[in-house]
Protein backbone atom coordinates (compact mmCIF):
# COMPACT_ATOMS: atom_id res chain seq x y z
CA UNK A 1 0.00 0.00 0.00
CA UNK A 2 1.47 3.37 -1.05
CA UNK A 3 0.18 6.08 1.27
CA UNK A 4 0.10 9.79 0.56
CA UNK A 5 1.15 12.04 3.46
CA UNK A 6 -2.43 12.61 4.62
CA UNK A 7 -3.72 9.07 4.17
CA UNK A 8 -2.83 7.34 7.39
CA UNK A 9 -5.54 4.99 8.65
CA UNK A 10 -8.05 6.98 10.67
CA UNK A 11 -7.09 10.37 9.26
CA UNK A 12 -10.08 12.67 8.95
CA UNK A 13 -10.58 14.18 5.51
CA UNK A 14 -11.21 17.89 5.10
CA UNK A 15 -11.25 19.31 1.59
CA UNK A 16 -10.36 22.80 2.82
CA UNK A 17 -7.36 21.57 4.80
CA UNK A 18 -6.14 19.49 1.84
CA UNK A 19 -6.33 22.49 -0.50
CA UNK A 20 -4.61 24.81 2.00
CA UNK A 21 -1.82 22.28 2.58
CA UNK A 22 -1.38 21.82 -1.18
CA UNK A 23 -1.16 25.58 -1.71
CA UNK A 24 1.31 25.86 1.17
CA UNK A 25 3.54 23.15 -0.34
CA UNK A 26 3.18 24.71 -3.82
CA UNK A 27 4.28 28.10 -2.51
CA UNK A 28 7.23 26.46 -0.78
CA UNK A 29 8.22 24.68 -4.00
CA UNK A 30 7.93 27.92 -5.97
CA UNK A 31 10.31 29.47 -3.44
CA UNK A 32 12.81 26.69 -4.25
CA UNK A 33 11.86 24.44 -1.32
CA UNK A 34 10.91 20.78 -1.18
CA UNK A 35 7.52 20.03 -2.75
CA UNK A 36 6.36 17.93 0.20
CA UNK A 37 7.28 20.42 2.94
CA UNK A 38 5.27 23.36 4.22
CA UNK A 39 6.63 26.87 4.58
CA UNK A 40 6.36 26.61 8.37
CA UNK A 41 8.49 23.49 8.56
CA UNK A 42 11.04 24.87 6.12
CA UNK A 43 11.19 28.14 8.07
CA UNK A 44 12.00 26.27 11.28
CA UNK A 45 14.77 24.24 9.60
CA UNK A 46 16.24 27.37 7.99
CA UNK A 47 16.08 29.25 11.30
CA UNK A 48 17.92 26.45 13.12
CA UNK A 49 20.58 26.47 10.38
CA UNK A 50 20.79 30.30 10.68
CA UNK A 51 19.82 30.89 7.06
CA UNK A 52 18.41 34.18 5.82
CA UNK A 53 15.13 32.54 4.76
CA UNK A 54 14.52 31.31 8.31
CA UNK A 55 15.54 34.56 9.98
CA UNK A 56 12.96 36.38 7.86
CA UNK A 57 10.10 33.88 7.49
CA UNK A 58 9.97 32.20 10.93
CA UNK A 59 9.14 35.33 12.97
CA UNK A 60 6.52 36.39 10.41
CA UNK A 61 4.82 32.98 10.29
CA UNK A 62 4.94 32.58 14.07
CA UNK A 63 3.32 36.01 14.44
CA UNK A 64 0.60 35.18 11.87
CA UNK A 65 -0.26 31.99 13.76
CA UNK A 66 0.21 33.34 17.30
CA UNK A 67 -3.50 32.71 17.93
CA UNK A 68 -2.74 28.96 17.95
CA UNK A 69 -0.78 29.48 21.19
CA UNK A 70 1.99 26.91 20.68
CA UNK A 71 4.46 27.32 23.54
CA UNK A 72 7.43 26.82 21.19
CA UNK A 73 5.93 28.74 18.26
CA UNK A 74 3.96 27.63 15.21
CA UNK A 75 6.94 26.79 13.00
CA UNK A 76 8.62 24.54 15.56
CA UNK A 77 5.35 22.80 16.44
CA UNK A 78 4.57 22.28 12.74
CA UNK A 79 8.05 20.95 12.03
CA UNK A 80 7.78 18.41 14.89
CA UNK A 81 4.34 17.32 13.67
CA UNK A 82 5.63 16.80 10.11
CA UNK A 83 8.59 14.74 11.35
CA UNK A 84 6.34 12.58 13.55
CA UNK A 85 3.90 12.08 10.69
CA UNK A 86 6.70 11.08 8.31
CA UNK A 87 7.86 8.48 10.84
CA UNK A 88 4.33 7.07 11.06
CA UNK A 89 4.04 6.87 7.29
CA UNK A 90 7.32 4.94 7.07
CA UNK A 91 6.09 2.52 9.75
CA UNK A 92 2.74 1.96 8.04
CA UNK A 93 4.36 1.44 4.65
CA UNK A 94 6.85 -1.07 6.03
CA UNK A 95 4.15 -3.19 7.67
CA UNK A 96 1.91 -3.48 4.59
Image (cartoon, grey):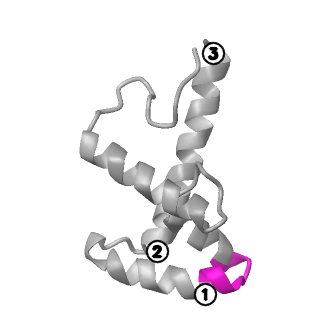
* Residue 28 appears left or right of 74: right
Secondary structure type for disc 1: helix
Secondary structure type for disc 2: loop
Secondary structure type for disc 3: helix
- Per the model, the C-alpha gap separating discs 2 and 3 is 33 Å
Q: Quadrant of the N terminus?
A: top right
Q: Which residue is mark 2?
A: 72
Q: Quadrant of the C terminus?
A: top right
Question: Is residue 41 positioned above or below 37 on the image?
Answer: below
Give the residue at x 64% y 31%.
Answer: 90
Give the residue at x 68% y 86%.
Answer: 52
The one of 8 and 2 positioned closer to us in this rendering: 2
Label 3 environment density (alpha carbons within 10 Å; few <14, some 14–19, many ≥20): few
Q: Which residue is mark 1?
A: 55
* Residue 57 appears left or right of 10: right
* Residue 78 appears left or right of 54: left
Residue 80 horizontal/vertical position (percent): 54, 57
Residue 26 horizontal/vertical position (percent): 51, 55
Give the residue at x 55% y 63%.
Answer: 28
The label shown at residue 26 is none
Q: Was residue 53 drawn as part of the magenta stretch in this picture? A: yes
Q: Was residue 65 drawn as part of the magenta stretch in this picture? A: no
Label 1 environment density (alpha carbons within 10 Å; few <14, some 14–19, many ≥20): some
Question: Is residue 78 positioned above or below 4 on the image?
Answer: below
Give the residue at x 45% y 59%.
Answer: 24
Does the residue at mark 3 contact the one at mark 1 (Cβ under 8 Å)? no
Q: Which residue is mark 3?
A: 95
- Per the model, the C-alpha gap separating discs 2 and 1 is 16 Å
Tell me which segment is drawn in magenta.
Answer: 47-54
Amino acid sequence: MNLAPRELPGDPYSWRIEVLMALDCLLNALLRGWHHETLSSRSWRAWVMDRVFGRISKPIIDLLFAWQKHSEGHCHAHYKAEVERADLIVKVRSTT
